[in-house]
Amino acid sequence: MHKQDVTIYDVAREAKVSMATVSRVVNGNNNVRKETRDRVLEVIKRLHYQPNAVAQGLASKRTTTVGLIVPDLTNLYFAELSKGIDDIALLYKYNIIITSIENRLMKEDQVIQSLLNKQVDGVIYMSNRLPDEAAEAFKRTETPVVLAGTKDNREEFASVAIDYKKADTEALNLLMHDGKRNLAIVVGDQDAVVNGENRIPAYEDFIKANNLGEPHIYTGIKDYSDGYNLYPQLVKDGINGVIVTRDISSVGILNSAMDAGTKVPEEFEIVTASATQLASVVRPALTTIKQPLYDIGAVAMRMLTKLMNNEEVDDTHIELPYELVKKQSTLNQ
Amino acid sequence: MHKQDVTIYDVAREAKVSMATVSRVVNGNNNVRKETRDRVLEVIKRLHYQPNAVAQGLASKRTTTVGLIVPDLTNLYFAELSKGIDDIALLYKYNIIITSIENRLMKEDQVIQSLLNKQVDGVIYMSNRLPDEAAEAFKRTETPVVLAGTKDNREEFASVAIDYKKADTEALNLLMHDGKRNLAIVVGDQDAVVNGENRIPAYEDFIKANNLGEPHIYTGIKDYSDGYNLYPQLVKDGINGVIVTRDISSVGILNSAMDAGTKVPEEFEIVTASATQLASVVRPALTTIKQPLYDIGAVAMRMLTKLMNNEEVDDTHIELPYELVKKQSTLNQ
DNA sequence: GTGAAAGCGCTAACAC
DNA sequence: GTGTTAGCGCTTTCAC
């Protein structure tokens, strides 16, 4: 970034008006006579003037930039959420600064602080658990935050998600009705609020309510090979039905079962709890809890635009409908 | 973004030094006596001072922000590239503004202009073909650009990629040596420079050089169902070996072939030209041209940091090695 | 080694 | 409807 060639001052001089008027034209303020406006617009075009958003940001205290905090870019779950966010952001002319925070050199709250230093107008948080320092920083700087596809144990931040407990219970019911009674839950990160405070408790409640014996909770199963390597353990533990939070892990378990000669779904059933593209292209196709990921992202971003404009928001905790899509990895009886 | 509570001026007053000295401390300038530095740092800590990056950007003309231009966030090819970029960006303390440009309300060069208005220090371009207006804008604003995982017909922009012609030729050779002589190429966007000026010509040359009859080029095959629905046409055209640029389309073709009862690879072979996670988790696993996507992103970002610092870069057109990974969708004889 | 002061390019009162 | 002016929070000469 070098010294700007043409500034608002150049336009003002050339159009024989003040900087204020040029500013008004650029920002669509109506208090400008049509002839003046046209003259200014002509000069803007002729000089190829482009406003410097950094200077605008400093002067107006609005950067029209929002921060996106995501654990991992290569996880399709977040990519699909991001797409919904991105489309709405474009619609409202916000730029997106994206930061991923998994396996990092920097601590999460440092990364978030650097985002805040960039003076983002708002933040969409999609990671597992909002650290206290970060929550503090958001409040101190009065930065609006919306959680998308995740939850927080604090009540203070807006969120858009689905009812994970209800969804998982429905999925477990499906497995049970198919005659599978040795049910397990396989999660990626047990510290995630969605898992630790929603999915796992729902599973435990279900097991207890239906007298299905000891609970079997497998944690830290994050990628394909984690899933693949877990399957023998599941066999050893006598499991014949699983609900898996990450679909890449589901695929690992599925392939491992197939390679072991296990009949899916006759002998072993799988439900994956976050439907991305992946779940539907493998064979047999996976039964999934289909979350409206694109919509979650879009609704979250829309809500954020309102919060950033200090508009009234009637409900800051939105739950969107999910769907249990029955495919070939369950009997569906 | 509201009026900042504690500014560099507050720190200066509290530490009984000038703003200039605080600025020096913040920016790690050595021309500060140790005692002064310590005193300033103590005040910074005590007041929880955080520099306003927007003001820094305006004053210094460096925003420590880079733009990422990508067609589609949910395409794993770009996600994996982005991960490499992101890691190196973090290392050098750059933030990333990401913009996707497929199916948009705004024209590509408008989106790019809005990125430039944000005064990004550099840009990584990963899309199909850099529009002339955008190329002009980059040059006019002297913004360094590196293409990652893509190419440009102009020679003027730096790039990091693989040798697509060589890779495709090698893949076609594999198919031919397996006894398949009715070979086709299936591409997503034929306007992409990688396809239009590299992959397709390589295919045509190969067909001609080996007397394999008429070329069969299928374009606009972008997603799973495009691939799935294309397969019957491939059968009708007598094709028994394909190279496919997008792996989601490869999977569509694969599943369609399997559903039709075709034996893969005995009767029909597939090579996918961009190996993401997807290619290795489907069954049969797909033979792929494995590009070092993470590395391409990382190397591109590293090069960009040099360009942004006006450092000498010996080679601005880097080709990284690829690998033809033989899996179950080819006979590999 | 440190400070004073002039900007960076723009917005937003306020005055007319 | 338009202009004047004072910042926004910081960096960077240039003195000393």
Image (cartoon, coloured by chain):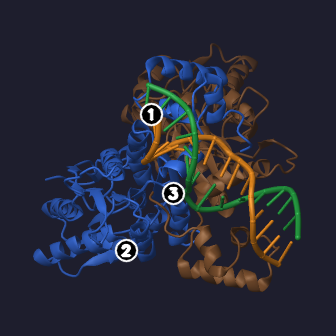
Chain colours: A blue, B brown, C orange, D green
**Quarter of image, res B170:** top right
- The N terminus of chain B lies in quadrant: bottom left
What residue would you read off at disc 2?
A190
Query: Horizontal placement of A89 versus B123: left or right?
Result: left
Tell me how far mark 1 sits from mark 3, CA to CA. 38 Å
Q: Which of A59 and A211 is in front in this view?
A: A59
Outermost residue on the top side: it is B214
Residue type at tag 2: Gln
Mark in front: 2 vs 1? 2
Q: In this view, does A114 lie to the left or right of D10?
A: left
Q: Is residue A84 above or below residue A67?
A: above
Residue A17 rendering spot, x and y as whole percentages: 57, 27
Identify the mark nearer the N-term, 3 or 2.
3
Q: Label 2 neighbourhood size at 10 Å, few (<14), some (14-19), many (20+)?
A: some
Task: Provide residue A293's location: percent of width, then percent of height.
Answer: 33, 49
Element at badge 3?
Answer: loop
Q: Which residue corresponds to mark 1? A: B223
- Same-chain status of marks 3 and 2: yes
Q: Mark 2 lies on which chain?
A: A
- Report x, y in % for residue A321: 20, 50
Residue at 67% of width from left, 63% of height from top? B91
Question: Do discs 1 and 3 belong to a common subunit?
Answer: no
At x 69% / y 72%, what residue is drawn? B22
In the rendered structure, are the residues bearing label 3 and label 2 in contact, judged by CB atoms less than 8 Å apart? no
Circle 3 Cα neighbour tier, 10 Å, few/some/many (<14 / 14–19 / ≥20): many
- What residue is shown with label 3? A119
Chain for numbered disc 1: B
